[in-house]
Amino acid sequence: MKKPIVIIVITSFVLIIIYCVIPIKGYKCPPPERPFNVPIDAKWCGDCDGGEWIYLVPDEEQYHFIVYMDWGQVQMDAIFIPDRTTTLSRENWKDQIFSYVSGDSQPYILGYEELGVFYILMCQYPAFGGTEWEIIKEKEIEKSSQ
């Protein structure tokens, strides 16, 4: 009588492990539904807990990117300058850009990868728009009025 219970408990435990742990290992969240105002060819850079849509503006000689929050609000619209000579191009940027980093104590940057090495594109000011650009402008106005 105890033997069937032990088998059921062990089988249940194994099934729980298979159902819960194995799918998590290597699982990649699909991008969220693209908001209507985000261009179709924008790239999702993020994971299950959030991220950004990154769009390279066409027909420009520079790296003009628009970064959208996951719900579609423009976060930063600016020219980004590589920190070194790069092979980043219109044809391969989606394969190389992997992140957008922002914050009070650091410059706004896009991360990209070439041959297994990580590099950055620095945001250039003045930007064209976005919620983060508005915050930067307000801080600069505060500094100049003190």
Image: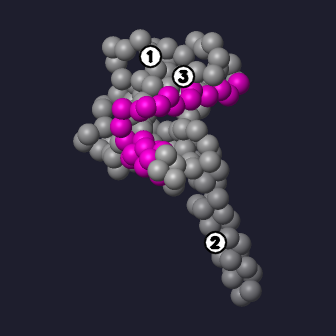
Q: How many marks?
A: 3
Q: Which residue is mark 3?
A: 81
Residue 84, given in percent of the width and then of the height, sits at: 65, 17
Q: Amino acid at mark 2?
A: Ser
Q: Is residue 133 magenta?
A: yes
Query: Looking at the image, can residue 135 be seen?
Result: no
Q: CA distance from mark 3 to mark 2?
A: 55 Å
Q: Does residue 13 appear to the left or right of 47 in the view shown?
A: right
Q: Residue furthest front?
A: 146
Comparing 23 with 11, the one in front is: 23
Q: CA distance from mark 1 to mark 2?
A: 58 Å
Secondary structure category for the residue under label 2: helix
Q: CA distance from mark 1 to mark 3?
A: 8 Å
Task: Specify the segment rendered in magenta.
Answer: 117-142
Q: Which residue is mark 1?
A: 62
Comparing 87 with 105, the one in front is: 105
Q: Earlier in the sequence, mark 1 or mark 3?
A: 1
> Where is 96 relative to 108, above or below?
above
Q: Which residue is mark 2?
A: 12
Q: Which mark's residue is nearer the viewer, 3 or 2?
A: 3
Residue 126, given in percent of the width and then of the height, sits at: 43, 31
Q: Are marks 1 and 3 in contact (CB under 8 Å)?
A: no
Q: Amino acid at mark 1?
A: Gln
Secondary structure category for the residue under label 3: strand
Q: Residue at 66% of width from left, 63% of height from top?
A: 17
For label 1, count other residues whose C-alpha is less than 10 Å away and answer few (under 14), some (14-19) or many (20+): few
